[in-house]
Amino acid sequence: MLKMSRRSLMAGAAGFPLLPMATTGGSAAMAAEPAAAPSSKPAAPKDLTHTLAHYVVNARYEDLPANVRKEGVRTLLNYAGVAIGGSRHQTVDIAVAALGPFSGPRQAGLFGRSERFDIMNAAFINGVSSHIFDYDDTHLKTIIHPGGPVISAILALAEMSPVSGRDFLNALVLGVETECRIGNAVYPNHYDVGWHITGTAGVFGAAAAAGRLMGLNEQQMVWALGLAASQPVGLRESFGSMNKSFNPGRAASNGLFAAILASKNYTSSDGMIEAKRGWANTISTKQDWAEITEGLGQRYESALNTYKPFACGIVLHPAIDAAIQLRNEHHLTAAQVKRVRMRVHPLVLELTGKKTPNEGLEGKFSVYHAVAVALVEGAGGEKQFSDRAVRDPVIVDLRGKVEPIVDASIKPEQVDMTVELTDGRELHKRIEHAIGSLEVPMSDTDLERKFIDLAEGILPAAQARKVMDLCWKVEGLANAGDIVAAGARS
């Protein structure tokens, strides 16, 4: 029987003419493919995906340091607050209406709403809800928002198959650890080319956390990570639209999907992260393999999570912080401001250079609006990035006086701001680290205030308090899925 190479067979099946085989000395021989150019990149460690899977499968709750467990709890609290806060946004309304007719069994609930969905769609919608305000947690080294993909997946799973709070928190930490370490390996090159890293790396976190709760063995976890690698989602072009929140939502459901398939022995390549044509080499020009596996169980990226005091992209936070401090220190009004000059990192204008936002979502990507609204209202919460705020005539007028100046010597976490007043005075403020950073973290009390503000008008105060208490006490819960039930509307 005539044997054909896979390449030749596929070419013929696709309708393309098969090229004649090259001949040498009268003998037929397949034309050789061009030799690969030599690479200066270090080779990936053998069995990297296996090493990561082994850690996720075997890491114990008891081995988590106290500070890592505490940060996991804070991540959960912040996630629940932003998911409740975003639950009534038009974006979530659309998703609920669009997916409702196609949902399977009512296995899991939604924060801030009465509808129930199958776990895939519940994970997606809660993931969207948690990110729509751009108010979620941030791993500053990669700008990944870790909570949305991971917690959306495992809370849905916990409602269908109850899990203890301790097991839940362990899975949460391991999921965040997985996505942030993988993100470290490719950031910033991967992000710079246009990928939304919360979606592309978040799917690994969701798969790892869900797989851990489902009791996958090491080989199944390898397959789950491999199936996650096949589902990168999210492009930065989506920023400023509903599509941006689609990315962590889809990462949550995709990761859950991967773990469920792997639990039934749906296979994948064993090297989908590190292989030559695997995830990291395909979607990034940078691969720092040590970031993924070095120090597993000893250093924790999940301990480096931060929480936003302002409902917008993290690059805007130094400017908002400076504007609010100047306003409050000098009791400024918009009428007093002649001009605002500020030196910013290049990424600020790259990501938030919209001069004339027309909708609240666009305002989150406008440094002009962010500074103007902070000076006028002395805040940067969700109300300051609403349709109302971006159309306020006073704020619109003031944003025309904001002049960001790109300065490569300014770090992403810094801003140097000068406010010129109509009376001739100049007020100056330099921010080295904005509130909400690792250096100036939000306190537990700050997180509770943020939660209460987000839940206002969605949940009664007593119900919001109950959800917060369950989050703080998650390690003692018989079933972590009770958190969603407590945060749903009756």
Image (cartoon, rainbow, N blue to C red):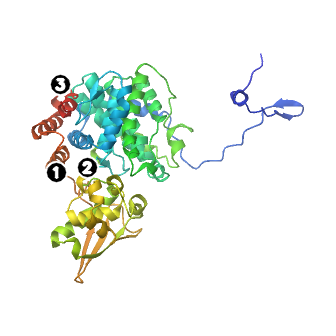
Under circle 3, the secondary element is loop
Q: Residue at x 32, y 39 (%)?
A: 92
Count of numbered circles on the image = 3
Looking at the rendered structure, the kind of residue marked 2 is Tyr
Residue linked to disc 1: 446
Q: Quadrant of residue 355?
A: bottom left
Looking at the rendered structure, the kind of residue marked 1 is Asp
Where's residue 153, x and y in %? 33, 32
Residue linked to disc 3: 478
Residue linked to disc 2: 307
**Left or right, residue 412 beside residue 422:** right
Under circle 2, the secondary element is loop
Which of pointers 1 and 2 lies earlier in the amino acid sequence?
2
Under circle 1, the secondary element is helix
Q: Quadrant of residue 225?
A: top left
Which residue occupies the extreme top position in the image? 1
Q: Residues within 10 Å of mark 1 (few under 14, many from 20)?
A: some
Which of pointers 3 and 2 lies earlier in the amino acid sequence?
2
Circles 1 and 2: CB atoms closer than 8 Å = yes
